[in-house]
């Protein structure tokens, strides 16, 4: 898994800070997460191939998380996209995109498929052979979901030396990877564990865009490899965080610590802060493995 | 009058080219004309004071002319704007902005006043003591207006030496500027023309965003000081211009020449052209005073 931060500031786009947008690459499957104004330019800057984006996840309908989506949809059309585009987001998103397309007399020459969300419980919203995506219900001023991306258990890996020593025909390799015992050329049963290794460890990424401090999400975040948790404010503005249903760096760290995640990334910084290093300092008082989102930066998970 | 080009390319925002947006400053009165995605960042780059914008004119509801508006409206709220914002644009604009605000649970702490346009004839849509704005009905794929900005005739200017020689009391200066004859201190009637000068010449600017070649607009453009006319294509793609209801540089120049405007500015270049100098060459074959729109550049009218 590789995460690219396209924007990690709150509220309003400025010359060098951009609203929330991220690209998650899981085994060459590209997911766009949130899409603030200007995201399509950030995609260009970061050399993301537009036609590789097949799935977009929108956490909520505050402008800094989705105002760039309609422009991106239009640009896909201009680029003569043909493949389907799946959009996951709160109820209402389809209406607003459809209205804008109607008013502009536009259409898409590809299929635009909306998966509108309204459940307040975590649900499985996407699944293929490699990945599953679950919602993480967040506590914000309007209906908001985070998203949990989990790699699926891969196949067992052949211990190729052992396989050859056991004289197993190549025709059985597929079955070995699937975990079965097989016969060798001499007709003996070879135990799977004797000639295969554990599947590569699966990784997980949790994206919590905008939320008040909310312990209810902790069970969903247990042991994730990377948790992105918003920290719009530092503790000195905790009253503002409470009022606007955002979190402080300390609160984000507390969630990370309780969920025993492997690593925490902070983002959605208020543009009032010129320097984000204080966020790291504040969070590290609670939790050891803290990093800061940074625009244009790639993170291996 | 001073015109600042924030964006002058068609279709889709890229790293160094932006969709249509312009700032027109008429005697310190600031008008925003069109508002493609990313316009608020372009405003920052060009150091335009956000709260000085009181009137926004939107030519039509293709995304590259208005997708930045909703974000700008949100940013005005975050900047705790208090003064009214007037928005002039096609019917439908209020619905789409209102829907987006409703979905985000947002409001404005200033008054947002929509002036929706639907007439197919030129009409006076704005007037104050300094300026009037008329629509220019254009011929595009959807309902589209250009805008004609005309300075109003100013007051006559005092010839201060002559006024003093004629011994006119300062109390009469106001009346002199308004064109009246007045009495001097000795009770003699002083003819207005003897002590005043012509009002400063008024200027006019016509903005024609997206349009097919359309001779019907020529009477409205007669003698304007500056005509901005789109030229999405060069003549080699005239068939594409016709199909998409855009203009070539040559067609724009032909309109300028027939309307006897003082100067023509070309813009709305297709992003397929890396270099815009060919637009100037093509237009200059027809009309002498051609300039090219250029992002971040100011033009005195």
Image (spheres, coloured by chain):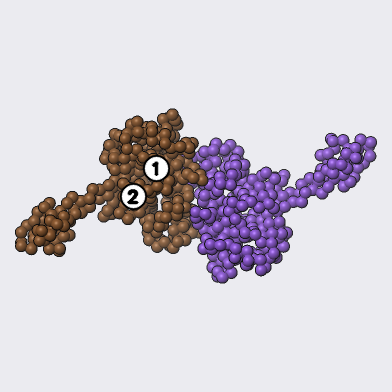
Chain colours: A brown, B purple
Q: CA distance from mark 1 to mark 2?
A: 13 Å
Percent of width and height locating residue B245: 56, 64
Q: Quick one: label 1 or label 2, which is nearer the N terminus? A: 2
Residues behind callouts 1 and 2 on a single chain: yes
Q: Quadrant of residue B158?
A: top right
Q: Residue at x 45, y 51 (%)?
A: A42
Q: Residue at x 57, y 59 (%)?
A: B268
Q: Residue at x 81, y 45 (%)?
A: B157
Q: Chain of mark 1?
A: A
Above/below status of B182 relative to B66: above
Q: Nearer the viewer, residue A77 or B275?
A: B275
Please give the count of numbered marks on the rendered protein.
2
Percent of width and height locating residue A193: 12, 51
Q: Nearer the viewer, residue A132 or B275?
A: B275
Which numbered tag is attached to residue A192? Answer: none
Which numbered tag is attached to residue A2? Answer: 2
Percent of width and height locating residue A172: 14, 61
Q: Residue at x 33, y 39 (%)?
A: A264
């Amino acid at each position: 898994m590789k995460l690219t931060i396209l924007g990690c500031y709150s509220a309003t786009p400025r010359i060098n800070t951009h609203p929330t947008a991220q690209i998650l690459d899981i085994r060459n499957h590209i997911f766009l997460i949130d899409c603030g104004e200007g995201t399509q330019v950030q995609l260009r800057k970061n050399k993301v191939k537009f036609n590789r984006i097949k799935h977009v996840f929108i956490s909520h309908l505050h402008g800094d998380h989705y105002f760039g989506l309609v422009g991106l949809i239009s640009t896909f059309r201009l680029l003569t996209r043909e493949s389907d585009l799946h959009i996951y987001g709160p109820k209402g998103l389809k209406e607003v995109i459809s209205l804008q397309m109607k008013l502009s007399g536009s259409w898409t020459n590809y299929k635009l498929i909306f998966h509108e969300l309204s459940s307040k419980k975590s649900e499985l919203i996407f699944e293929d052979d490699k990945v599953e995506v679950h919602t993480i219900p967040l506590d914000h001023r309007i209906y908001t979901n985070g998203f949990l991306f989990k790699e699926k258990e891969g196949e067992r890996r052949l211990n190729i030396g052992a396989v050859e020593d056991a004289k197993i025909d190549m025709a059985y390799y597929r079955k070995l990877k699937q975990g079965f015992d097989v016969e060798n050329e001499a007709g003996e049963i070879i135990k799977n564990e004797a000639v295969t290794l554990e599947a590569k460890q699966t990784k997980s990424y949790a994206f919590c865009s905008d939320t008040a401090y909310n312990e209810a999400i902790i069970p969903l975040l247990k042991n994730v490899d990377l948790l992105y948790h918003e920290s719009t404010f530092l503790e000195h503005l905790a009253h503002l965080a409470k009022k606007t249903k955002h979190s402080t760096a300390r609160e984000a760290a507390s969630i990370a610590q309780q969920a025993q995640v492997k690593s925490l990334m902070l983002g959605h910084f208020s543009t009032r802060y010129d320097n984000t290093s204080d966020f790291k300092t504040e969070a590290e008082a609670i939790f050891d493995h803290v990093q800061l989102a940074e625009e244009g930066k790639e993170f291996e998970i």
